[in-house]
Image (cartoon, rainbow, N blue to C red):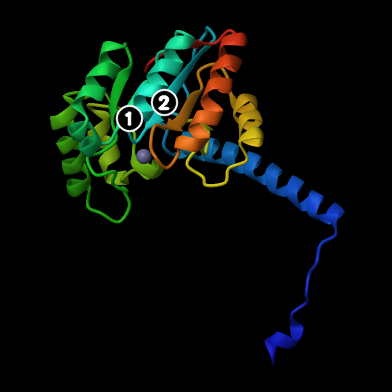
């Protein structure tokens, strides 16, 4: 059978387009919660959200440090008296040791995000752990770990858990997405924020434009809602 003869040209009307958009929006909302539920269910030893009695949230920034972007983040956090956690890439920390010291001096915590920003899938557990150790040698901090891309090497969970709190997240800003609708993203992350939430931003060149739009308003929102912003 000639499959081409079965192709129907589909041209949605604006109403239909709107319905599709609503459906896609709904699905990403469900997916986000699904991700949290799946993670929490199958990988309960990882931290997805902290349980807290008081109104506290944990802002986290991945992939730095970067001399301009990380310093800008420090200034923004200072404006609202926020402390945060920075999951740094070892090779960036080695290139910008001054920025790393500034983070520590300002009361923010430093976490390990591997030396080469490694995906944990498709490589051996030994190679994965070795890369994490290499990052440790630069940051001299063995307390917090976050797997790049959220893809942890499953064999590494048990040995890493002995030394680290493995920190995932429940609120993903998606600031790394090119062409992100920042207005919608702002609404989405504000709606998803709860007591104990762990929120992911990136102090990286890739996320820079979105970060600079999203972070100041989000910090204002958190302050207005009475959330304390603490480092992990
Ligand atoms: Zn990363």
58 vs 180, left or right, is left
Count of labels in the image: 2
Cβ–Cβ below 8 Å for labels 2 and 1? yes
Q: Position of residue 15 (x, y in %)?
A: 86, 52
Q: Residue at x 52, y 39 (%)?
A: 174
Q: Position of residue 79 (x, y in %)?
A: 47, 10
| Mark 1 residue element | strand
Question: Could you say which is closer to the camera, residue 119 or residue 80?
Answer: 80
Residue 119 visible from this viewpoint: yes
Image quarter for ligand 1 equals top left
Could you tell me which secondary element the residue under label 2 belongs to? strand
Left or right: where does residue 16 sit relative to residue 122? right
Among all residues in the image, which is located at the extreme bottom? 1
**Residue pointed to by mark 1:** 87
Q: Which residue is mark 2?
A: 60
The furthest residue to the left: 137
Q: Is residue 159 above or below residue 219?
A: below
Q: Does the Cβ of the disc 1 residue fall within 8 Å of ligand 1?
A: yes
From the viewer's perspective, is residue 42 above or below residue 86?
below
Seen at 52% across and 25% down, the residue is 215
Q: Nearer the viewer, residue 87 or 211?
A: 211
Label 2 to label 1, Cα distance in Å? 7 Å
Name the quarter where the N terminus is drawn: bottom right
The image quarter containing residue 95 is top left
N-terminal-most mark, 2 or 1: 2
Is 225 left or right of 209, judged from the image as shown?
right
Residue toward you, 154 or 75: 75
Quarter placement of the C terminus: top left
């Amino acid at each position: 059978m000639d499959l081409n003869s079965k192709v129907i040209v589909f041209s949605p009307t604006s109403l239909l387009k709107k319905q599709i958009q609503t459906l896609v929006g709904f699905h990403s909302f469900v997916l986000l919660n699904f991700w949290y539920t799946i993670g929490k269910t199958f990988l309960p030893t990882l931290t997805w959200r902290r349980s807290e009695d008081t109104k506290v949230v944990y802002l986290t920034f991945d992939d730095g440090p970067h001399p301009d972007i990380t310093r800008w983040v420090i200034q923004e956090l200072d404006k609202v008296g926020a402390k945060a956690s920075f999951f740094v890439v070892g090779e960036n920390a080695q290139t910008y040791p001054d920025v790393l010291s500034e983070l520590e001096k300002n009361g923010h915590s430093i976490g390990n995000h591997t030396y080469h920003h490694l995906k944990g899938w498709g490589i051996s557990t030994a190679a994965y752990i070795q890369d994490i150790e290499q990052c440790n040698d630069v940051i001299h901090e063995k307390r917090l770990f976050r797997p790049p891309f959220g893809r942890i090497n499953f064999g590494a969970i048990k040995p890493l858990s002995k030394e680290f709190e493995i920190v995932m997240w429940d609120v993903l800003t998606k600031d790394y997405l090119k062409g992100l609708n920042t207005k919608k993203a702002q609404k989405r992350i504000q709606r998803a924020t709860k007591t104990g939430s762990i929120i992911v931003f990136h102090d990286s060149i890739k996320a820079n434009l979105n970060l600079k739009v999203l972070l100041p308003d989000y910090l204002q929102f958190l302050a207005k809602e009475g959330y304390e912003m603490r480092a992990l």
